[in-house]
Image (cartoon, rainbow, N blue to C red):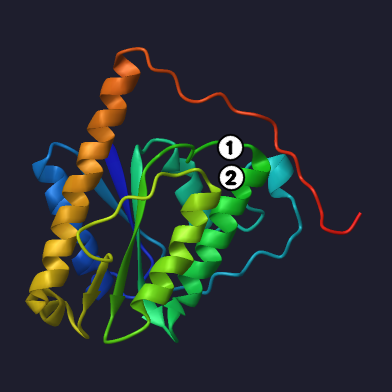
Amino acid sequence: MKVLLVNGSPHREGCTYTALCEAGDALNACGVETDVFWIGNRPLSGCIACHKCTELNRCVFHDAVNDFLEIAGDYDGFLFGTPVHWGAASGGMTAFLDRAFYADLNGGGNRFYLKPAAAVISARRAGTTATWDQINKYFGLMQMPIITSRYWNMVHGTTPDEVRQDAEGMQTMRILGRNMAFFLRCKQIALQNGLPLPAQEPFQFTNFIR
C-alpha cells in the first residue's frame, strides 16, 4: 500500500512539508509506503473551462497537474497539505486541485474513486478550519473517504522548528497517519475477501433552470 503526500506550499521543505512528514512517518510505521509530491512554486493557471480534459483524460496545460495525474493511479491514498493564505488554501494548491480533480472527473479517469484522502493545514495562527472545510469539499465530490484525526488536521508555526514545537499538532498528524493506515488495511482485507466495490451509475446532470 502506498500513500502520496502532496505538498501544496511554495516552500518545498517548510511548515506544510513538516506536518506531512509527521503523518507520513506514522504511515510508514504501520507498513504503508509514502512518497512526497511537491506542486512547486511556479505559477499554476486556474481552470479555463476549455473541457479538453474530456478528450485527453488530463489537463490541457503541461505542468505539475499532469505530472501528478500520471502517477496518482498508482497510489492507494492521499494527504493534501496546504498553508493558509488569506484564510484559505494557497492559490497554487487551489488551482492544482481544481484542475487535477476536474480533469479526472471530466475525463473519466477514475484515479481517485474510494481512495482515502485527508487535508493537512499549516498556518501561523488562523484560517485553518475554513481551509480544512474547503479542501474536504474536493474529496466529497470525488467519492473519496475523508480520514480524520483526534482534532482538525492542522499545525501552527511560522518555521518548521516552530511546527515541531506544536505538540498537539504533531500528535494530530501521527494519529491521522495511523487512522489512514487502519482504513487502508480494512479496505484491503475487504477486497481480498471478495467484497466488491459499490456499483456505479452514469452521471446524471441536471440544471436548476430548464
How crowded pointer 1 is (Cα within 10 Å; few <14, some 14-19, many 20+) is rated as some
Provide residue 171's location: percent of width, then percent of height. 11, 63
Q: Is residue 97 left or right of residue 205?
A: left
Q: Residue 16: in sight, yes or no?
A: yes
Give the side of residue 112 with respect to residue 107, left or right. Answer: left
Nearer-N-terminus badge (2/1)? 2
Q: Say above or below: 43 vs 19.
A: below
Q: Secondary structure at mark 2?
A: helix
Looking at numbered disc 2 in the image, what kind of residue is underneath it?
Asp
Bin the neighbour count of mark 2 within 10 Å (Cα to Cα): few under 14, some 14-19, many 20 and up.
many
Q: Is the residue under label 1 in contact with that under label 2 (CB below 8 Å)?
A: yes
The label number, if any, that marks residue 47 in the structure image? none
Q: Residue at x 42, y 73 (%)?
A: 131
- Residue at horizontal 39%, vertical 35%? 74
The residue identified by callout 1 is 109
The three-letter amino acid code for the residue at tag 1 is Gly
**Between 205 and 162, the one nearer to me in the picture:** 205
Q: Is residue 168 found left or right of 1 in the rendered image? A: left
Which residue is depicted at the point 72% across and 43% down?
54
Q: Which residue is mark 2?
A: 104
Q: Is residue 14 visible?
A: no
How far apart are the two marked residues, 2 and 1, measured between alpha carbons? 5 Å
